[in-house]
Image (cartoon, rainbow, N blue to C red):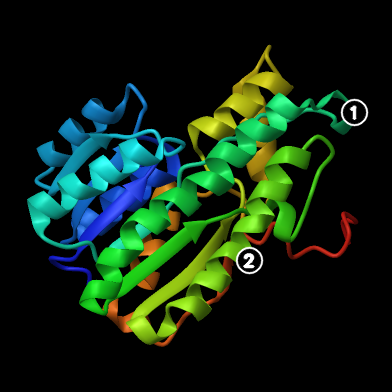
């Protein structure tokens, strides 16, 4: 997969799937800028650079357009261009629908929808100028394909990203820019670990084990699994793929029933 020497921005790359995406892109030769406001940003950059990978970090709040524009300008100053954008940063705080207030909904909208919107608006003009770009937006199987009770705010914001990514594909297809959407299932990330702690505070590891065994493939996804798919969609070889939604979920959306034949 040809991403060598490409300049990539990965939002939410300090942990979880974002870290896996940043690591895989960098291991394949991309120069990766992580946008994240997490306290883990410096640690992640140090660990990845310690492995000989070209990774830098910019403390960025994706709800703050001025902050985003400043970080994008610093990437341009450092590398001269931006070739790849991975809209990965996202949040999930589930509540039953009748207990979900507007603050919870706004929290999800501000980060899961307005975040990718703001970062994309800031980055795309640089791609248009160079007539080249790869945009990969991380949605979820939740919303577009499956749902559980209590997922409302997360579900509607993640499903919106499918339309967002498809519209970007159509609008910028003549500018040499592709846009695709990845919908992961359950992966071994801090977000899922947090869900396990809420569901089974007495034994979160048992919840994760049960969750993994419930998937047809028999394990949770690894952040690097998402990273390899993102890296392919961001590569030169994927130039004929745009506007597509790709599910990567270990088969969790395959069963038609829960019956054990």
For the question of whether residue 120 can be seen, the reply is yes
Q: Which mark is residue 163?
A: 2
For the question of whether residue 1 can be seen, the reply is no
Identified at 22% across, 62% down, the residue is: 82
Of callouts 1 and 2, the N-terminal one: 1
Element marked by disc 2: helix
| Viewport quadrant of the N terminus | bottom left
Considering depth in this image, is 185 or 90 the residue closer to the camera? 90
Q: Which residue is the site of mark 1? A: 98
Considering depth in this image, is 257 or 33 the residue closer to the camera? 33
Residue 97, how many percent across, how many down? 86, 33
The quadrant holding residue 108 is top right
Identified at 40% across, 66% down, the residue is: 135
Residue 183, how many percent across, how many down? 58, 59
Q: Residues within 10 Å of mark 1 (few under 14, many from 20)?
A: few
The quadrant holding residue 35 is top left
Residue 37, how many percent across, how many down? 36, 29
Vertical side of 6 occupied by 33: above or below: above
């Amino acid at each position: 997969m040809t991403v060598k020497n490409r300049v990539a921005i990965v939002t939410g790359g300090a942990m979880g799937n974002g870290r896996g995406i940043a690591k895989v892109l960098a291991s394949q030769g991309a120069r990766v800028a992580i946008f994240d406001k997490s306290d883990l940003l410096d640690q992640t950059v140090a660990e990845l650079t310690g492995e000989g990978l070209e990774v830098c970090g910019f403390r960025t709040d994706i709800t703050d357009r001025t902050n985003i524009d400043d970080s994008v300008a610093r990437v341009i100053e450092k590398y001269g261009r931006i070739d790849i954008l991975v809209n990965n940063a996202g949040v999930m705080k589930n509540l039953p629908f009748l207990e979900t207030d507007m603050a919870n909904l706004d929290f999800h909208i501000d980060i899961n929808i307005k975040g990718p919107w703001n970062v994309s608006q800031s980055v795309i003009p640089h791609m248009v100028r160079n007539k080249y770009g790869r945009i990969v937006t991380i949605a979820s199987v939740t919303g577009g394909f499956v749902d559980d009770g209590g997922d409302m705010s997360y579900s509607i914001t993640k499903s919106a990203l499918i339309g967002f990514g498809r519209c970007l594909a159509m609008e910028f297809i003549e500018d040499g820019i592709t846009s695709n959407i990845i919908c992961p299932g359950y992966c071994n990330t801090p977000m899922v670990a947090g869900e396990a702690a809420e569901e089974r505070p007495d034994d979160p590891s048992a919840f994760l084990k049960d969750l993994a065994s419930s998937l047809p493939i028999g394990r949770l996804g690894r952040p690097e699994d998402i990273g390899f798919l993102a890296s392919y969609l961001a590569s030169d070889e994927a130039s004929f793929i745009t506007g597509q939604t790709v599910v990567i979920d270990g088969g969790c959306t395959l069963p038609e029933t829960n019956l054990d034949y």
